[in-house]
């Protein structure tokens, strides 16, 4: 009975064992956290807010009898899109730029919008890169044109169309 009282009174050895055990648990938990963070598991478990994405594709296009083209633009992204400006460039590097007051849309996600792109005398407010609009180019059969549209979020989408 005397030996049991001695063990209960000497808690110095038990405190050392508990402290060592606690340190091992802390190191193991820290190692698991570092492993989860480095493998990307931690970020996939956390709730993340989806960021709306703009993505535009054209379904088809029709050249008009005058200097214009109608592009049927599909919004395949998750955010509504409003077009702010457009650029039309020919093979020679000549370019028409729409006025800052031109807008098209909004185009809802998974919706299609018929967007009219005008150049030459059809667009009296467009800017021609090589002089006055009356000396610019027109859509000619067999030529290809690069059309770039810019959204209000400043994303650019470029397509090459051949008349």
Image (cartoon, grey):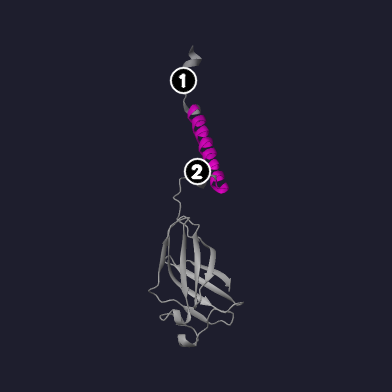
Q: Which residue is mark 1?
A: 8
Reply above or below: 148 against 6: below
Q: Which residue is mark 2?
A: 45
Q: Residue at x 40, y 69 (%)?
A: 103
Q: Which residues are magenta?
A: 14-40
Graded by Cα atoms within 10 Å as few (under 14), some (14 to 19) or many (20 or more), the crowding at tag 2 reads few
Q: Residue at x 52, y 34 (%)?
A: 20
Q: Residue at x 49, y 83 (%)?
A: 129
Contact between marks 2 and 1 (CB within 8 A): the answer is no
Reply above or below: 1 against 10: above
Q: Which badge, 2 or 1, comes first in the chain's sequence?
A: 1
Q: Give residue 17's position: percent from left, percent from top.
A: 52, 30
Q: Nearer the viewer, residue 24 or 96?
A: 96
Tell me the mark number nearer the camera, choosing from 2 and 1.
Answer: 2
On whether residue 93 falls in the magenta region, the answer is: no
Q: Give residue 107's position: percent from left, percent from top.
A: 43, 60
């Amino acid at each position: 009975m005397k030996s049991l009282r001695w063990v209960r009174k000497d808690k110095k050895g038990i405190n050392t064992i508990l402290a060592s055990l606690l340190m091992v648990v802390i190191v193991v938990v820290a190692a698991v956290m570092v492993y989860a963070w480095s493998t990307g598991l931690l970020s996939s478990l956390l709730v993340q807010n989806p960021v709306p994405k703009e993505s535009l594709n054209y379904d088809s296009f029709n050249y008009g009898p005058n200097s214009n083209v109608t592009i049927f633009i599909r919004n395949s992204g998750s955010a509504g899109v409003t077009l702010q400006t457009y650029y039309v460039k020919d093979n020679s590097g000549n370019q028409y730029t729409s006025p800052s007051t031109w807008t098209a849309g909004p185009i809802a996600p998974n919706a299609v919008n018929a967007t009219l792109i005008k150049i030459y005398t059809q667009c009296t407010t467009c800017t021609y890169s090589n002089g006055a609009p009356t000396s610019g180019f027109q859509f000619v059969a067999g030529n290809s044109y690069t059309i770039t549209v810019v959204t209000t979020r400043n994303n650019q989408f470029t397509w090459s169309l051949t008349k």
